[in-house]
Amino acid sequence: MIKAFCTRKKLMEERKAVKLLDGVFDMKNTQVVERFDASNTGAVVGKFPVKTIRRFGFTLVELLVVIAIIALLLAILMPALQKARNQAQRLACSAKMRTWGLAAAMYPVDHDGLFPWYGGVSTGNPYTDPTETLYLSTLMPYLGGKQVKAGTDPYEGDNKKNATNEIRRCPSGYKDSAQRYGWAGWIGPHFALRARHPVTGRYSGPFVWQQPSAGIINEPIRAANVRHTATWVTFFDCYDWGFYSPAEYDIQKPNGTDTDKDGLGDTNRAILYSEGKNFNWALPKLHGGGCNMALFDGHTEYLKFRDFETRKWGDE
């Protein structure tokens, strides 16, 4: 009797525990296990829920489907992300271009209305004459840098810092990709001719080739001569060291060879190009089929290459 009472009491406690466990366990994932009496009778004493472990995982097919979906999303989103990245780089480039334009506009204020010169003092070589002031360096005081002479090695020291200055590098270009030459800006197709020959051309810029003290400039352009400041370009975002364009210029010596197709004769004689003829490679598609440019009044514009011929330039 005592043993039977104990067994019944234990069974009641176990059944009570089962009811309590029903509220704790998720019975969908619970396996009910019967407990048998340890005696020889083999009678069922009670049933107890046992929590089962559900195994989570992917089959190979499921994994391949997920990978395919991710690849599809990337294919859809990457062009949009790349476009947004290019747009951000173009805006950053425009901000730098505006800084250069403002520097070029401030320079005449401190230099009797003259623009900075482009080439050398006497040799015409701005990166081999130790006494030469690099063209790029003339504007550096307005850009947080300092003006230095070419020195014995224009590729090192302060000259290299000027050439690879962060404000000069386009965000779309490679790091330290800036040319180490002193030439750093656009001055039109007649850059080497303005000092020696009377020229005409739609895109001629305001800068002269030689320093005024060289004594070979016919008539340097002064800031006061610029009438339409909103259409007078001072800088283009260029790939190479100059900007060439469809132009027709009147020069005294139109004969000569031009093996590198840069618009200048290889024997110091210029080549005559007719209106509408494009030459050289200085303006690639840097920013989606166009480039940034700084104008004399201090603002910047983005111009598609197909719009070059239809835009109003300078004092036209």
Image: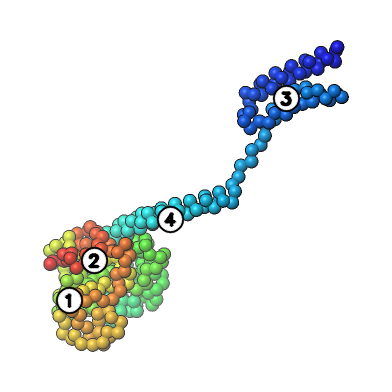
Element under disc 1:
loop
Classify residue 146 by image quadrant: bottom left
Q: Amino acid at mark 4?
A: Ala
Q: Percent x, y for residue 284?
A: 31, 69
Q: Which residue is mark 1?
A: 275
Q: Secondary structure at mark 2?
A: helix
Give the number of the mark in front: 3 or 4.
3
Q: Looking at the rendered structure, which numbered label has been put on residue 306?
A: 2
> Which kind of residue does numbered mark 1 sit on?
Glu
Residue type indicated by callout 2:
Arg
Secondary structure of the residue carrying tag 3 is strand
Closer mark to the observer between disc 3 and disc 1: 3
- Would you say the residues marked 3 and 2 are in contact, meaning their CB atoms lie under 8 Å apart? no
Residue occupying the point 37% across, 62% down: 172
In whole angstroms, how far apart are the C-alphas of marks 3 and 4? Answer: 56 Å
Q: Position of residue 17 (x, y in %)?
A: 70, 21
Residue under numbered circle 4 = 75
Residue 232, image x, y percentages: 18, 64
Q: Nearer the viewer, mark 1 or mark 2?
A: 2
CB-based contact (under 8 Å), mark 3 and mark 4: no
Near-viewer residue (35 or 311): 35
Q: CA–CA distance between discs 3 and 2? A: 85 Å
Query: Which residue is the site of mark 3?
Result: 47
Q: Is residue 97 above or below residue 183?
A: above
